[in-house]
């Protein structure tokens, strides 16, 4: 099968040739003809499977071949993405594919000044990539109109819900013309997403090129158990031992990112960090330098987990496990992309046993444990497996107390003493709101 047999036009084929794409990936083979035929789509595809081209190529073709010329402040196709980085990345891909077509494309996202974006939108754009919050700002300030909108793409839709964009999505949805094509892409399909799809899509074609919620099988995954306070030390040890060249590291919090970067830099290691508190320009610069191999270790919160495409990234390290198990799949999806192999190592402490168990259950595998001599944890990480079971050790007989008074370390080996598993930290589960789309009369805030 070739891109030509899928029905793509010559200007697009020329761009693909320049990019070195020879054969369509499975998601492209299914999505391209369906989108060209005007179908709504609900597509689940693993990260790195080429889904961006799967929706962008046919979309560009439809924009070039059909529909009116775009008018002032209008947009004909809208691609919604969860993060600024992904907006840049998707737009860059779109720009390359559209090189030989007379179409205007643009990306808008928060964290940068809105005025240049308003100026650019004045003459209208054929295809706009946007994050939900900034898109709504622009719409509310009358910099954008949706009357010409013919296609809506939701990319990484599950991530948008995880990031709390459900209300924004519902507001955007209300502002769009009812008659349009909608394509929903997501690496994982939760029940919330299926609900959302039921509300937004019209007789969609469902594409599932990989089993639900299974991590990329090109990625070798293993964990090292360690006490929480020794994680930085273990990281540096593993890095030196494995002679790691380029590593994307995920930490749970912004402070965690900053602390690890500071520690690494203090040791003379070439490291940088990205998280939501940093200005957009700083984030983009760190990412660009990492992609250009000018930075060896990039430490990030989950804001960087989705969609980032870094060529030949050999290794992802989970310095902390993600709180939402599905994020594990997205994180490790940064390696082993486009057919190459990769490795994902997670440093796991006793506090994280429930998170580990959730990941193993979701990915239907028991992650291989590899102990690192001299780093065996004092607080043992209980055994887990893909069934979601945390294997508890039998209770030890209590030693008689040496003297009166209830001394002793309460926290040491808590899960053993109490027969309970220590709760994962933080114990607050992120709340996922699912938008309920109002089909009644539209109400706008004044
Ligand atoms: P995506 O899953 O859309 O982020 O794409 C992952 C990577 O695969 C990107 O670097 C794309 O440029 C690349 N890619 C997508 N489709 C193809 C293809 N048909 N042949 C070769 N590379 C591709």
Image (cartoon, helix red, strand yellow):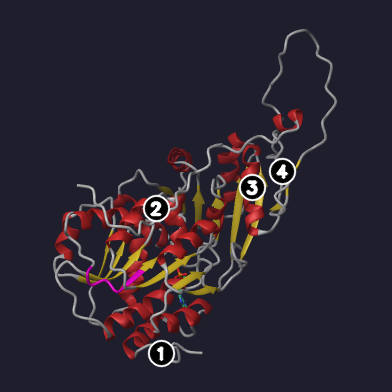
**372 horizontally vs 312: left or right:** right
Indicate which disc, 4 or 3, sits on the residue closer to the N terminus.
3
Q: Residue at x 17, y 64 (%)?
A: 120
Q: Quick one: label 4, few (<14), some, or many (20+) residues within 10 Å?
A: few
Judged left or right of residue 411, residue 274 is left
Main SS of the magenta part reads loop
In this view, 144 is above or below 327:
below
Between the residue at mark 1 and the residue at mark 3, the CA separation in whole angstroms equals 45 Å
User: Which residue is identified by label 1?
Assistant: 7
Residue 373: which numbered mark, if any?
Answer: 4
**Residue placed at 42% from the left, 51% from the top?**
303
Magenta residues (range)? 147-152
**From the viewer's perspective, is the residue at label 2 or at label 3 nearer?**
2
- Identify which residue is drawn at 55% across, 55% down: 326
Q: Outermost residue toward the top? A: 404
Give 129 or 158, whichever is nearer the viewer.
Answer: 158
N-terminal label among 1 and 4: 1
Marks 2, 1: nearer the viewer:
2
Identify the image quadrant of residue 437. Answer: bottom left
Disc 1 versus disc 4: nearer the observer: 1
Rendering coords of residue 411 (x, y %): 67, 26
Q: Position of residue 400 (x, y in %)?
A: 84, 16
Q: Horizontal and vertical percent for residue 283? A: 35, 52
Residue 90 in sight: yes
Give the vertical position of 99 relative to 92 (above or below). below
Q: CA distance from mark 2 to mark 3?
A: 27 Å
Q: Which mark is residue 399?
A: none
User: Which label was assigned to residue 356?
Assistant: 3
N-terminal of the two: label 2 or label 1? 1
Q: Are marks 1 and 4 in contact (CB under 8 Å)?
A: no
Q: Which residue is mark 2?
A: 166
How far apart are the alpha carbons under marks 4 and 2?
A: 46 Å
């Amino acid at each position: 099968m070739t891109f030509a047999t899928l029905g793509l036009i010559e200007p697009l084929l020329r761009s693909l040739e320049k990019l070195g794409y020879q054969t369509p990936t499975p998601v492209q083979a299914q999505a391209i003809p369906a989108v060209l035929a005007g179908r709504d789509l609900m597509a689940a595809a693993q990260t790195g499977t080429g889904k961006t081209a799967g929706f962008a190529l046919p979309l560009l073709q439809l924009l070039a071949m059909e529909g009116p010329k775009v008018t002032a402040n209008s947009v004909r196709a809208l691609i919604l993405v969860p993060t600024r980085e992904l907006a840049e990345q998707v737009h860059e891909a779109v720009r390359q594919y559209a090189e030989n077509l007379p179409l205007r494309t643009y990306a808008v996202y928060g964290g940068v000044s809105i005025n240049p974006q308003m100026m650019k939108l004045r003459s209208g754009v054929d295809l706009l990539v946007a994050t939900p919050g900034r898109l709504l700002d622009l719409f509310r300030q009358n910099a954008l109109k949706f009357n010409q909108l013919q296609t809506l793409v939701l990319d990484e839709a599950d991530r948008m819900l995880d990031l709390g964009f459900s209300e924004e999505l519902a507001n955007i949805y209300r502002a769009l013309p009812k008659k349009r094509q909608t394509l929903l892409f997501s690496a994982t399909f939760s029940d919330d997403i299926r609900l959302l799809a039921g509300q937004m899509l019209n007789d969609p074609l469902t594409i599932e090129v990989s089993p639900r919620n299974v991590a990329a099988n090109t990625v070798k995954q293993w964990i090292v158990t360690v006490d929480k306070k020794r994680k930085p030390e273990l990281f540096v040890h593993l890095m030196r031992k494995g002679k790691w060249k380029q590593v994307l590291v995920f930490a749970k919090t912004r402070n965690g990112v900053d602390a690890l970067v500071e520690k690494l830099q203090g040791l003379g290691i070439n490291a940088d960090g990205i998280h939501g508190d940093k200005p957009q320009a700083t984030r983009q610069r760190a990412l660009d330098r990492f992609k250009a191999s000018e930075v060896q270790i990039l430490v990030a919160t989950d804001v960087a987990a989705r969609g980032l495409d870094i060529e030949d990234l050999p290794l992802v390290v989970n310095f902390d496990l993600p709180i939402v198990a599905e994020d594990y799949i997205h994180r490790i999806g940064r390696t082993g992309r486009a057919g190459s192999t990769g490795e994902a190592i997670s440093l796991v402490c006793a506090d994280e046993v429930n998170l580990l168990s959730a990941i193993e259950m979701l990915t239907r595998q028991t992650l291989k444990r590899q102990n690192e001599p001299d780093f065996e944890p004092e607080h043992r990480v209980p055994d887990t497996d893909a069934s979601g079971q945390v294997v508890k050790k039998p209770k030890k007989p209590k030693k008689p107390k040496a003297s009166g008074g209830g001394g002793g370390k309460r926290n040491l080996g808590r899960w053993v003493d109490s027969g309970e598993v220590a709760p994962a930290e933080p114990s607050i589960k992120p709340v996922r709101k699912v938008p309920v789309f109002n089909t009644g009369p539209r109400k706008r805030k004044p």
